[in-house]
Image: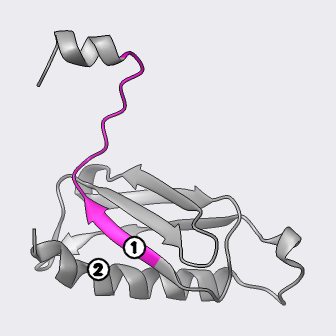
Amino acid sequence: MTFFKDQSFAVVALVVLSLFFFSGCGGKTDDRPEVAINGVVTLNGAALKEGSIHFRSTKTGESAYINLTAGGKYSITFPKADIGSEYEVSIAPPVVEIENPLEQKNNPK
């Protein structure tokens, strides 16, 4: 899925700008702020119809993800953001969570 690579730059730029905008005057690492991140994922100018967006701090390894909603939109809260640090951002197929593994075995898609 090479089309996600081109999209990653725009998403990374959006995340960096969002983190910069919400950053304050720094503080102790124990006081890392909660940060809301939202946006729209597009591909060739059109909103991505389905998928998920994943964020991972390269500093701590902490991560968060969310499935895209209609129109490629996402809104997620990163509980303890590393302001000014690098994050890896990736786009993937939608995440399907199944509470009961037997349900998946008995009802495969």
**Relative image position of residue 65 (x, y in whole percent):** 45, 55
At 24% from the left and 19% from the top, the residue drawn is 104
Q: Is residue 55 left or right of residue 20?
A: left
User: Horizontally, is 22 left or right of 109 in the view?
Assistant: right
Q: From what the image shows, is residue 64 above or below residue 56?
A: above
**With 99 as the anchor, is 81 left or right in this view?**
right
Please indicate whether residue 31 sits to the left or right of residue 70 in the image: right
- Nearest the eye: 31 or 58: 58
Q: Name the residue rendered at 41%, 88% in the picture.
A: 13
Magenta-highlighted stretch: main secondary structure? loop
Q: Please name whichever residue, 81 or 75, is drawn nearer the observer in this view of the structure.
A: 81
Q: Earlier in the sequence, mark 2 or mark 1?
A: 2
* Mark 2 touches mark 1? (CB < 8 Å): yes
In the rendered structure, find residue 8 and report the number of the disc placed on it: 2
Q: Is residue 89 magenta?
A: yes
Q: Which residue is mark 1?
A: 89
Instruction: Please identify the quadrant where the C terminus is shown.
Output: top left
Residue 24 lies, with reference to residue 102, above or below; the image says below
| Residue for point 31% across, 85% down | 10
Report the span colored magenta: 88-100
Name the amino acid type tagged 1. Val
Estimate how packed mark 2 is, as few (under 14), some (14 to 19) or many (20 or more) residues with alpha carbons within 10 Å: some
Instruction: Report the residue at 18% width, 73% height from top.
Output: 4
Distance in Å between CA atoms under marks 2 and 1: 7 Å
Residue in front for this viewpoint, 63 or 44: 63
Measured from the top left, where is residue 79 in percent x and y? 68, 58
Mark 1 lies on a secondary structure that is: strand
| Other residues around mark 1 within 10 Å, as few (<14) / some (14–19) / many (≥20) | many
The amino acid pointed to by label 2 is Ser
Tell me if residue 75 is in the magenta stretch: no
Residue 16 location, x and y as percent? 51, 86
Quarter of the image where one finds residue 88:
bottom left
